[in-house]
Each structure stands twice: as C-alpha cells, then as structure tokens.
Amino acid sequence: MKHSTKTLVDLLRAAGSLDDPIMEAAFREVPREHFLPKLTPEEVYVDQAIVTKSTPSGIAVSSSSQPSMMLQMLKQLQLGPGHNVLEIGTGTGYNAAIMKHIVGPTGKVTTIEIDADIAQQAERNLQKAHALDVKVVNNDGAQGYAPRAAYDRIICTAGIWDVPKIWINQLKSRGILVTPIQMGGAQVSAAFHLGEDGTLFSEQNLPCR
C-alpha cells in the first residue's frame, strides 16, 4: 500500500480524531513528507511524534508533533479563515503549513524558532510544500513577535510553566492562546481565552505531553 496524506487522514478518522472538514482538507493538502525529508513515506504517515533533532547525549530537542495531538490543539485554537496567528516553536514547519491552509490567503501565520538550524530547515520545508506565505522568525519565542501583532490566536508547541506577559499583550481581546502547561504536577493543553479585563481563563484543559 502506498503511504500518503490519505493514509494519515484515514488513520485519524478511524481513531475519531478528525471530524472537521476544514482540518481534513488541510491534512490532505499538506504532505508531511516535505517536513521529514530523510524518512520514508511508511515512517512519515503514522500517527506518531518523530524526533528530528537530539543532543549528543540523545536528549530530544525538537520533533514533528504527533498528528492527533496537533489536531487536539488546533481544535482548541478554533482557528478560522482570515485569522492572524502566532506559533511559538516552529519545529519542522508542518504545523505552520497546516495552519496557513486553514487561515487561507487572507490570514497570516508567523512562527518562531529559537534554533537557527531548525528555523532554516523549516523554511526549506515550507518552500517545498509551497507554503510561501508563512513567516519564520529565528528568535526567542518568549518575546513573541511584535511586528505582526495583535494576534487573533497564539499557539505554543513547547511545554511552559507560566504564560509570558508579552504574549498576553500581543493577543487581541477575546483572542485564544493554546499551550501545554504544567498544572498540579501534570501537563495539560490549555485553551486560554483573553477577557476584556486582560485576564486569561481556560475551562478546556486536555492531557498532553
């Protein structure tokens, strides 16, 4: 059997993870293989996280997230056409390309990566996938990216212990910020909604790692 975007979509639908036609179209149209060029299609089109960079001692420092986890967080993000979205943690660029497909030509995707080598590879991957409108910024994601603020949505793909104040300042009123965060000794994916008074509140906290 030839492994392709259809293989991955079928896996996600069978697991009950993929039930939104807009997201299904994005996962069908954006080939994950462009973002994992050193792997075979059989290795790429699985519902698994794939480590893409490790330290000399073998500690993983970057990966392509598990597609079902990407879906979970994108559902929490409530992303739609025309949105201006900031991603903290570019990785391979796959998630940014999926989001660009969802926000469409009138939307904007800015993604920040602290590792220069990873950021450069992500740019090459995005070019192969024809996601040319995604802006990759090589910088510390804790600072956000003021030049393209304010954002309708912010998504962080790295675990944090607290939400930087600067992210809140760059989020539009009634915007949504999705991030893995340590809460009570466990990590959850929280979907924070920004109130008019500047406070964050999340009532949907889903298990993640």
Image: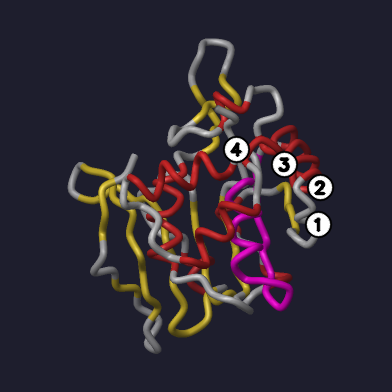
**Residue under circle 4?**
4
Total numbered circles: 4
Which residue occupies the foreground of this view, 54 or 134? 134
Residue 122 is labelled as 3
Q: Is label 1 in a helix, a strand or a loop?
A: loop
Please state the extent of the stretch shown in magenta in the rendering.
94-114
Which residue is found at the position 59% from the left and 61% from the top?
A: 99
**Label 4, label 3: how many angstroms apart (C-alpha)?**
20 Å
Quadrant of res 81: bottom right
Q: Is label 1 in contact with label 2 (beta carbons under 8 Å)?
A: yes
Sequence order check: which comes first, mark 4 or mark 1? 4
Please say if 161 is above or below 35.
below
CA–CA distance in space, label 3 to label 1: 11 Å
Q: Residue at x 63, y 79 (%)?
A: 82
What's under tag 2, amino acid-wise? Gln
Q: CA distance from mark 1 to mark 2?
A: 6 Å
Q: Nearer the viewer, mark 2 or mark 4?
A: 4
Instruction: Give the residue at the far bottom of this rendering.
Output: 196
Residue 66 at x, y = what percent? 45, 39
Kindly identify which numbered label has been placed on residue 132: 1
Q: Nearer the viewer, residue 97 or 61?
A: 97
Residue at 49% in and 40% down: 65
Q: Is residue 183 left or right of residue 198?
A: left
Image position of 52 (left or right of 14):
right
The residue singled out by tag 2 in the image is: 127
| 101 falls in the magenta region | yes
Q: Residue at 59%, 52% (x, y): give it.
A: 28
